[in-house]
């Protein structure tokens, strides 16, 4: 009964102004919120078991009686994965009638994942977005211009729902070239700009040459950013850059930074957070269970993102726990200025490139404020490097329009390095196709020399050294 009362109070609070919502929610004790989350979890579990063909069959095969489950950890080794969404189809997860859908290419497969939602769910996430943006200082008199990509992506829709509640001026520019954005946005004199981190870095480089206007803050989501990149942005605009963490599968924002910029405050109202495979430092794969999805709930969904849960008090005073900075991924998908890239992307990019061996490796690293994507290839004749590069660029332009568009906007550098046959793998080594050097301190690095005598990076970070 108490949980139902707390839920009603929460819903009423979120339907008021952001300021009033913060005041009302602040009076609800943490113990009451914890009881609410457990009630929502049991309701979600019951709904999935009754209406979702996927979950009904999984629970039957495993002998899981959802009436006896009070916490996600009691489901043992049962998880939902992105592969489940792709192979089974999103329809197998539906428990209600959807109004809208989005897709995500954040995967090592060429097949996108489709996820469905209701407009009520969009509105609810918009209310939480409005509340958080209010905490960061967004007000009705502000002027927002967003450069989020609107192609099948959830972020611009959630943002629009949030700023509508704050009732501030809002222009949706879409993800256009930063120089064009600068010229077209300047007449509006926005006080807040939204976009992807690598895009915002490039916009800041434009502003360094052409001049800035006063900003209250910038807000970025969709990928990580190097400390150097963040410093460049904040130095250029004289304003803070806040980061958001989320996944389209889970419907956008799972957490966001506060003014302290020390981890992402978790959305504990709508998600249950767990860690799997925790190491000695407390880092593990983040596992999510949705608590307020009545169209397509996801239970113990494996994010493949590696971080830790932070429950110590934050200096901002907000009581919600945090997610630490994302260290990396458990799979070989990397999010960078190029986009969401995995091994299959480069298989397509290399298709038809004569003279390239079967062994290749991609290394993503930072150079200054920009991501560099280095494609290391084994070639019998290094004199063929020029034609190979031309084929790679042609394939990129023809088969991956978004990646090519990001390259034209200078959001990343793509480089091709040639090595002698047999030099990348090494003796007895397992070749990791995509290595992200940005996330972890390197404990052992072996670089290829010009003549290819030493093996290239073999995943030698604390995260993936076990794959060597």
Image (cartoon, rainbow, N blue to C red):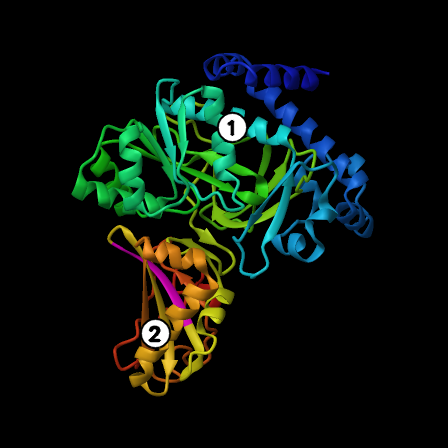
Q: Does the magenta run of residues contain 272?
A: no
Looking at the picture, tell me which residue is in the foreground, 71 or 368.
368
| SS category of the residue bearing label 2 | helix
Numbered disc 1: secondary structure: helix
- Disc 2 marks which residue? 389
Classified by dominant secondary structure, the portion drawn in magenta counts as strand
Q: Quadrant of residue 250?
A: top right
Q: Can residue 296 be seen here? A: yes
- Distance between mark 2 and mark 1 Cα atoms: 44 Å
Left or right of 191 on screen, residue 155? right
* Up-down relation of residue 311 to residue 59 (above or below): above
Which quarter of the figure has residue 404? bottom left
Label count reads 2
Tag of residue 324: none
**Does the residue at mark 2 contact the one at mark 1 (Cβ under 8 Å)?**
no
Neighbour tally class for label 2: few under 14, some 14-19, many 20 plus, Cα within 10 Å: some
The crowd level at tag 1 (other Cα within 10 Å; few <14, some 14-19, many 20+) is many
**Magenta region: which residues?**
361-367
Place of residue 264 in the rendered image (x, y in percent of width and height, measured from the top left): 44, 35
Q: Is residue 420 left or right of residue 16?
A: left
Residue pointed to by mark 1: 161
Say which quadrant the C terminus sits in.
Answer: bottom left
Residue drawn 66% across and 36% down? 99
Q: Residue at x 35, y 18 (%)?
A: 141
Residue 71 image position (x, y, % from top left): 68, 36
**Residue pictured at 48% horizontal, 35% vertical:** 255
Q: Nearer the viewer, residue 12 or 57?
A: 12
Quadrant position of the N terminus in the picture: top right
Residue 138 higher or lower than 157, as above or below: above
* Residue at 67% across, 54% down: 84
Q: Position of residue 20 (x, y in %)?
A: 49, 12
């Amino acid at each position: 009964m108490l949980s139902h009362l707390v839920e009603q109070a929460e819903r009423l609070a979120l339907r008021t102004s952001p300021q009033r919502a913060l005041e009302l929610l602040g009076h609800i004790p943490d113990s009451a919120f914890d009881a609410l989350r457990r009630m929502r979890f049991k309701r979600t579990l019951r709904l999935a078991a009754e209406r979702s063909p996927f979950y009904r069959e999984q629970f039957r095969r495993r002998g899981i009686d959802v009436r006896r489950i009070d916490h996600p950890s009691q489901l043992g080794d049962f998880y939902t994965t992105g592969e489940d969404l792709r192979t089974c189809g999103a329809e197998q997860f539906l428990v209600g009638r959807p109004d809208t859908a989005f897709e995500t290419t954040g995967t090592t497969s060429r097949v996108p994942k489709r996820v469905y939602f209701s407009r009520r769910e969009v509105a609810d996430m918009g209310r939480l977005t409005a509340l958080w943006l209010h905490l960061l200082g967004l007000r009705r008199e502000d002027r927002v211009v967003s450069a989020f990509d609107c192609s099948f992506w959830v972020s611009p829709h959630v943002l629009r729902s949030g700023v509508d509640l704050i009732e501030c001026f809002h222009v949706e520019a879409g993800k256009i070239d930063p120089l064009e954005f600068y010229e077209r946005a300047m007449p509006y004199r926005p006080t807040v700009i939204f976009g992807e981190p690598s895009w915002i870095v490039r916009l800041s480089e434009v502003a360094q040459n052409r001049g800035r206007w006063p900003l209250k803050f910038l807000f970025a989501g969709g990928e990580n950013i190097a400390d150097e990149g963040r410093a460049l942005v904040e130095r250029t605009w004289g304003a803070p850059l806040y980061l958001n963490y989320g996944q389209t599968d889970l419907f956008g924002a799972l957490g966001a930074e506060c003014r302290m910029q020390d981890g992402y405050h978790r959305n504990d109202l709508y998600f249950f957070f767990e860690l799997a495979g925790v190491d000695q430092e407390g880092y593990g794969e983040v596992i999510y269970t949705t608590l307020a999805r009545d169209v397509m709930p996801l239970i113990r969904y494996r994010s493949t993102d590696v971080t830790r849960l932070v429950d110590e008090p934050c200096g901002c005073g907000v009581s919600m726990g945090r997610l630490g900075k994302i260290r990396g991924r458990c799979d070989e998908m990397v999010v960078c200025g190029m986009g969401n890239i995995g091994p299959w992307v480069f298989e397509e990019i290399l298709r038809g490139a004569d003279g390239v061996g079967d062994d290749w490796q991609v290394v993503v690293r930072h150079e200054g404020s920009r991501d560099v994507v280095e494609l290391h290839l084994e070639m019998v004749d290094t004199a063929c490097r020029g034609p190979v590069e031309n084929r790679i660029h042609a394939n990129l332009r023809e088969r991956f329009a978004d990646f090519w568009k990001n390259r034209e906007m200078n959001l990343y550098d793509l480089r091709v390095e040639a090595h002698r046959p047999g030099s990348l793998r090494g003796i007895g080594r397992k070749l990791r196709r995509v290595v992200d050097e940005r996330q972890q301190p390197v404990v052992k690095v072996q670089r290829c020399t010009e003549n290819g005598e030493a093996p290239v990076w073999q995943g030698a970070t604390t995260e993936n050294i076990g794959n060597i």
